[in-house]
Amino acid sequence: MTEIKPHGSHFGPFEAVVEGGRLTAVRPFARDPFPGTLLASIPDAVHSAARIDRPYVREGWLKGGRRGSSRGGDPFVPVSWDQAVRMVAEETARIRGEHGHPSVFGGSYGWSSAGRYHHARTQLHRFLGLGGGFTAQVTNYSFGAGMTLMPHVLGTNDVVAGAVTDWAAIRAHAKLMICFGGLPLKNGLVTSGGAGAHEYVPQMKAAVAAGLRFVNVSPFRGDTAEFLGAEWVPIRPNSDAAMMLAMAFVILESGREDRDFLARCAVGFEPFADYLRGQFDGVAKTPEWAEALTDVPAATIRRLALEAASVPTMMTATWSLQRAEHGEQPWWALVALAAMLGTIGKPGQGVGFGYGSQNGMGTPRQDVPSVGGVPVRNPVGAYIPVARVTELFERPGGMLQYNGRDLTLPDIRMIWWAGGNPFHHHQDLNRLLRAWNRAETIVVSEPWWTAVARHADIVLPATTTLERNDIASSSRDRFVRAMHQAIAPVGQARNDADILADIADALGYRAAFTEQRDEMAWLQHLFGRWRQACAAQGIEVPDFAEFWDQGYVEIRAPAVPYTQFADFRADPRANPLNTPSGKVEIFSETIARFGYEEVAGHPAWREPREWLGGELAKRFPLHLLSFQPATRLHSQLDTGRVAAANRVQGREPVLMHPDDAASRGLRDGDLVRIFNDRGAVCAGLRVTDGLRRGVVAMATGAWWNPTVPGATDAPCAHGNANVLTQDVGTSRLGQGSAAQSCLVEIERWPGEPPPVTVHAPPPGAAAP
């Protein structure tokens, strides 16, 4: 008997095809104009041999190996659910009692699965918050530096992740779109929370048809699709701020700055103009100055600046651009450039971030909230910026400076992770593991034997979305999608909500955690709250029963194109920005008062330590860019057929220019060793002339596979790029990930390549 169930995912909506109790296929949602390829991997992941079949405990932990013990090499011992719940409850109570609530780290960063009720991190935070609190994480890996900066400069993070100027306005009014970091097509395949339609590609094609000209400022030509016909400006990595500053200099030199906008809508232009002229450091930020840093010809910089001043222009930068040393600077410089051009708030023009970073950015939609869980206040005030997690473990009692605050780092004794994989997201994985091992107890709830599960003490098998009911919803999408349970839980997997309810029961607060609702009661409650929010905005949606039966709700697209900051531009006094001045802050007195030497009060060029223009390039002459994969979402779906088809001899591919390959005696398809002082990985070489010389590129997300399990210096057999990336903050202002500032060298892999074993269960564990 074949059953068809409506469902949703970060990769898109679909119909689950179930035969004999097994997910055999998925069919794209009929309303999705561009489903993409990732859906094909879902059945492989659900029934993967890497699924965790039952609860496990690390053998060394059972024998008393706690703080400072090595994780990743011990076998696991199967236990019953009753035993696992009791162990976790007792250990949680002990650590809280002996060391206090801040000693429990519950940041649990990660995308989790689509579905708003069963969102793992939300459930865990609810559980830990009701139990007394935990040390938390703020910001994110995607745009952590930018989301710290933008409230100072533009008074909002909507320009990063919210309702940015939509494509309807851009194609109707703009003639030029300059894209720093490009508009990567692959990123349009995913939407956090789940979407009903992939509209990224159709929107861009409509913009091309309307005559919009695109410029791709990136080391990688493939960062814009061929159908865009974009001009490619192959810039040196990490030098974008210099190019933007030089463009600003050209606008100033030619007298093309919009003095009216700068007077009405911005503050701090004069000190920034003085900086551009070189009055502070004796160096004018001319195109010739920038050419030496960027490898972009001065004539190109000058031409693009004058074109932007002559035609309606939208400028954007990808989220990845600020994931570098001093990553705040290019984003701030782009805002300053847009302010000088006077385009902020003009129809279809100005500046926005992330158009090329995720589906839904710029999609015309009404400003309706997504369906969401019910959060609980965290009574503990301790937190860290998400990308400083290794420092948190390394330096208990130390001080971390962030965004004008001095944060005292708690002594973490217990780590609890659900729905994420820090051994994908974080940088310098060998260093992370050394710090990770300082904890006394690590609890992980996870469907698969990912690296975070393999390096845990107590492993709790969680269901996938296909094994439970939920609601997919994203604030960037017009659809809300019903997610019907399609199959029974695999092995002994359980829902996170049920696992945590049992642990809360053992700790005495089950009723507070569940509010006496089961799964369907929670879904009706959350949908009802969302329905009320829609009604408050005059939007009618069906009741839950009709929604669940139909499988989706669609909110109509707005009739009028949207331009961000239009009201502010029209009347900045009546519609001020949420900045101290109420205006665009080209110069921020607040940031200047922080006194951070590496961050001035205005955008400025700051030379990275690890880039092709520095001393370290003499030893490691290749700049490694680590990008989001087209074949999975982060590390999700790594066991699927789409990811498998892309590998080279079973390893993650690395892209390299033909001249760089030839100079090292390498050929397309070779297995290579990529290395620096932080570690080494085995990868498969893919040669392309679409990458500038001196730059190599590799997708993140290959499951970490040290050749010696538990070792903190072993090469990765599978090709995890974050073995190589550096773990430093962008600056003390943003403390974001600086993964894109990374130098390496590449050689042919010496001898026999190591086996890839990470998609099979670890010793002591069985496949479901």
Image: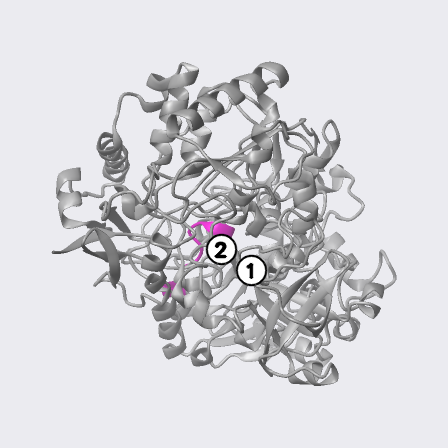
Q: Nearer the viewer, residue 441 or 629?
A: 441
Question: What percent of the width, then of the height, locates residue 447?
Answer: 41, 45
User: SS for tag 2?
Assistant: loop
Q: Nearer the viewer, residue 111 or 270?
A: 111
Question: What percent of the width, then of the height, locates residue 30?
Answer: 21, 63
Q: Looking at the image, is 300 positioned above or below residue 548?
A: below
Residue on which the image places disc 1: 700
Magenta region: which residues? Answer: 159-169
Q: Looking at the image, is 592 positioned above or below residue 690?
A: above
Evaluate if marks 1 and 2 touch, with contact meaning CB atoms under 8 Å apart. yes
User: SS for tag 1?
Assistant: loop
Residue on which the image places disc 2: 635
- Going from N to C along the chain, the mark reached first, 1 or 2, is 2
Q: Amino acid at mark 2?
A: Ser
Residue lying at 67% horizontally and 30% vertically, measured from the top left? 67
Residue lying at 49% horizontally and 55% vertically, measured from the top left? 635
Q: Is residue 360 left or right of residue 538?
A: right
Q: Looking at the image, is 298 positioned above or below residue 105?
A: below
Q: Is residue 369 magenta?
A: no
